[in-house]
Image (tube, grey):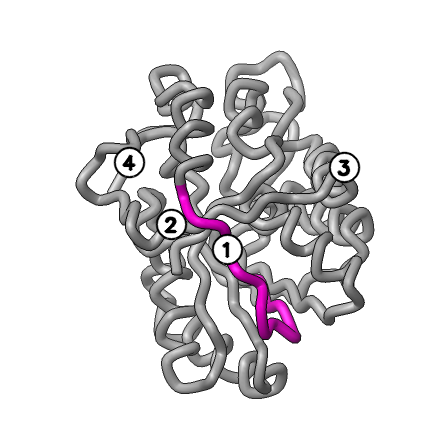
Amino acid sequence: MVAEPLTDLVARGTPERIWTRWRHRRPELSLTGWRHLIVVAPHPDDEVLGVGGLIALARSRDLPVTVVTVTDGEASHPGSPTCSPTQLADVRVAESRRAAQELGAEAPIRLGFRDGRVATDEAAVTAALCDILTECGHTGAWCATTWRRDGHPDHEAVGRAAAAACAGTATRLLEFPVWMWHWATPEHPVVPASRARTLTLPGAAVDAKLRAIAQFRSQILPMSEDPADQPILPPEALDRFTGASETFFV
């Protein structure tokens, strides 16, 4: 599990060109049989960074999409002089709603668990996801969520909770990395290359994803000049999410 800030990981992370070559060597993800996409994101923006293109593609085919945000992302800027955690939660929820509109999706379902403490509440998260999957679940339902080895405790806990919820249904589980792109290398022993699939996105889905990412101003732009308000996702981090493909572990 990675404990250091994302900004530090980005500064020393694997160059995007290396990951691009790795992605191009992965088999293409088959979309045969999907009928409903359920996306479970630990924080507002994970759904767009990881699978914004997949969401846009599903909506372009008139498939229903249900987005679930487990937390409101209130802990992204600890010590901020500009926004209290409550204020930041309001900002991020609004950003996530606008991003969903850009992708053609409904506003996310908010579970309201504590940012940074999802592992503590994992059983309750699993139960909440079971209820959602039962309501949405039918033949052809797919659940995309953060990879269980992604390196962020909330991402891993949400991945485990979603996997446990899917296990009791016919829902197909897809895991997507977010932090892995920053701390790992293609040769890292924990990276499940044999399970990796690449989804090549049409231009319209890429464009929609870029518009959605741009809604998260609290994460991609400084909120003030104070060091505690600097972007969580500087340009070199965004480079890993703005290409013409997305990656899934199946």
Which residue type does callout 4 highlight?
Answer: Ala
Determine the CA span between mark 3 and mark 1. 20 Å
Where does residue 175 sit, x and y in percent of width and height?
43, 57
Check disc 3 and report its element: helix, strand or loop: helix
Check disc 1 and report its element: helix, strand or loop: loop
Where does residue 200 sit, x and y in percent of width and height?
59, 44
Determine the CA span between mark 4 and mark 1. 31 Å
Q: Which mark is residue 207?
A: 3
Residue at position x 63%, y 27% in the image: 220
Check disc 4 and report its element: helix, strand or loop: loop
Residue at position x 64%, y 48% in the image: 52
Determine the CA span between mark 4 and mark 3. 33 Å
Which residue type does callout 2 highlight?
Answer: Ala
Where's the C terminus, which quadrant?
Answer: bottom left
Specify start and end residues of the magenta stretch as a single range. 26-39
Q: Which mark is residue 196?
A: 2
Query: Which is closer to the viewer, label 4 or label 1?
Result: 1
The stretch drawn in magenta includes residue 30: yes
Determine the CA span between mark 3 and mark 2. 24 Å
Mainly helix, strand or loop, the magenta region? loop
User: Mark 4 sits on what residue?
Assistant: 3
Residue at position x 45%, y 41% in the image: 178
